């Protein structure tokens, strides 16, 4: 069962759902809770980007990401590139509540796809990590604190 706006409010009041920081009027839209983009993002070290023929799961050197920050002027995601970022919001749900994550329509219209959209386990705790992929023929600029996705909460029996 998908939680209604009233059930989300009730779950927030009862501590079954915790979101910090959270602005009820700005982020609660019906059955959806919007999340915003943190200034933190992750990328492969520029030292190893070229020439790389293959990322190998058994070679940890190629699987270490560096943390960086989105500046006030934003971050450009080049065409056919992946961008790894996280939410400003720290989420905690009771084991009776699962979460689904969906992209914002505006981002999809710009060619940015949320690769890891789908279900998040009941009882999840932490910031949400986003993997965005730019399928557009043009670079796309994104900004910290912009709405990046929305969550739907589901009661687990």
Image: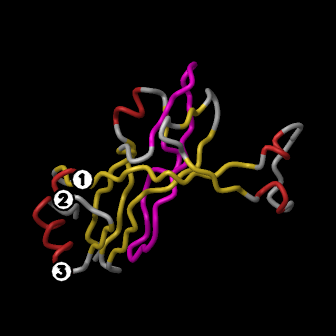
Question: How far from the left and from the top, in percent, is residue 8?
Answer: 18, 66
Task: Find numbered disc 3 in the image and state the secondary structure of the residue it sits on.
Answer: helix
The tag on residue 27 is 1
Q: Looking at the image, which residue is at 26% across and 70% down?
A: 155
Spatial separation of the CA atoms under disc 1 and disc 2: 5 Å
- Magenta-span inclusion, residue 137: yes
Which is more N-terminal, label 3 or label 2? 3
Task: Find numbered disc 2 in the image and state the secondary structure of the residue it sits on.
Answer: helix
The one nearer the camera, 50 or 60, is 50
Examine the rendered structure and indicate whether residue 67 appears above or below residue 11: above
Task: Find numbered disc 1 in the image and state the secondary structure of the residue it sits on.
Answer: helix
Examine the rendered structure and indicate whether residue 3 appears above or below residue 125: above
Question: How far from the left and from the top, in percent, is residue 127?
Answer: 46, 65
The answer to which quarter of the image holds residue 5 is bottom left
Is there a contact, CB below 8 Å, between mark 1 and mark 2?
yes
> In the displayed image of the protein, which residue is found farthest to the top?
137
Q: Looking at the image, which residue is at 46% across and 70% down?
A: 126
- Residue to which mark 3 is pinned: 14
Q: Looking at the image, which residue is at 35% across and 45% down?
A: 147
Examine the rendered structure and indicate whether residue 25 appears above or below residue 13: above
Horizontal arrangement in the rendering, residue 46 relative to residue 76 (left or right): right
Count residues near mark 3 (Cα–Cα under 10 Å), then give few for <14, some for 14-19, many for 20+: few
Spatial separation of the CA atoms under disc 2 and disc 3: 15 Å
Horizontal arrangement in the rendering, residue 60 relative to residue 155 (left or right): right
- Residue to which mark 2 is pinned: 24
Which is more N-terminal, label 1 or label 3? 3
Residue range corresponding to the magenta coloring: 114-143
Please tell me how many numbered marks the rendered image carries: 3
**Quarter of the rendering occupied by the N terminus:** bottom left
């Amino acid at each position: 069962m998908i939680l209604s706006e009233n059930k989300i409010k009730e779950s927030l009041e009862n501590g079954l759902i915790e979101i910090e920081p959270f602005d009820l009027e700005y982020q609660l839209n019906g059955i959806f809770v919007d999340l915003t983009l943190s200034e933190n993002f992750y990328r492969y070290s520029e030292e190893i980007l070229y020439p790389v023929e293959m990322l190998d799961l058994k070679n940890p050197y190629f699987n270490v990401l560096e943390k960086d920050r989105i500046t006030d002027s934003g971050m450009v995601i080049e065409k056919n590139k992946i961008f790894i970022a996280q939410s400003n919001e720290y989420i905690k749900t009771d084991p009776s509540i699962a979460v689904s994550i969906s992209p914002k329509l505006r981002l999809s219209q710009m060619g940015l796809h949320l690769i890891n959209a789908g279900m998040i386990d009941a009882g999840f705790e932490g910031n949400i990590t986003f993997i965005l992929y730019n399928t557009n023929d043009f670079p796309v600029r994104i900004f910290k604190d912009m709405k990046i996705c929305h969550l739907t909460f589901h009661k687990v029996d």
